[in-house]
Amino acid sequence: MIRVVLAEDQGMVRGALASLLNLEPDIEVVGEAADGAEAAEVVARARPDIVLLDIEMPGTDGLAAAATITRRTPGCRVMILTTFGRPGYLRTAMEAGAVAFLVKDSPARELAAAIRRVHAGERVIDPGLAAAALSAGPNPLSGRERDVLSAAADGSTIGDIAERLHLSEGTVRNYLSSAIQKTHARNRIEAVQRARTQGWV
């Protein structure tokens, strides 16, 4: 049996996925989680072959959870299953140790087949997303630029961002200016939107 843990914050979606996968003769869902931190705990406890992670979850998201699980439980292979097929997310997921990246609108039989392929040692990437990631190129933003843009997303002032990230206001302005330039945006709101569309933040 291929032992699987599911991490998805929407209970109904998680339950439906678990039911579908448990119908497969060679797949067993051995644990479920509603966020990334819980997923890492469940994986450490259940020791599954594979963990299926959503990206957008409260608290610790799927990308951060992927890195934690890869580090703490190296025998577990990480698959990302998400609504958000953004090129930057694919790149980040692979860097975090994920071996599969699929979008949720794939048919259920394709998911089961992908789980079997990953269990056999293959990498499985949504082909359309792989092509988009290659054409989009690497994330141009530095770690600090991503932090500052993320902090600016809710409309916070320069002072608020500086206080939250323990930086000077001048440093925050410099990072914002650089991020706006790199995303070819006119202002920080547009920079946030463009970075999110690409999956860079």
Image (cartoon, grey):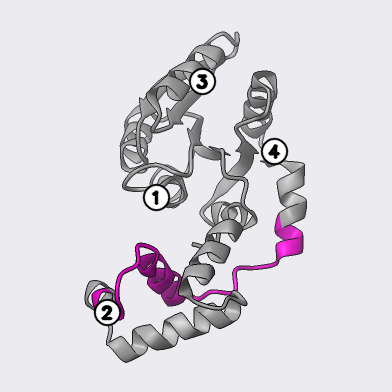
Name the disc covering residue 17, or none: 3
Q: Nearer the viewer, mark 3 or mark 1?
A: 3
Q: Nearer the viewer, residue 19 or 30?
A: 19
Q: Looking at numbered disc 3 in the image, what kind of residue is underneath it? A: Leu
Disc 4: which residue: 122
Q: Earlier in the sequence, mark 1 or mark 4?
A: 1
Disc 2: which residue: 162
Q: Nearer the viewer, mark 1 or mark 2?
A: 2
Q: Residues within 10 Å of mark 4 (few under 14, many from 20)?
A: few
Quarter of the rendering containing residue 40: top left
Disc 1: which residue: 68
Residue 14, horizontal then vertical, whole percent: 44, 23
State which region is magenta.
133-160
Q: Looking at numbered disc 2 in the image, what kind of residue is underneath it? A: Ala
**Is-magenta flag for residue 117?**
no
Question: Dot 2: what SS?
Answer: helix
Residue 147, horizontal then vertical, whole percent: 39, 70
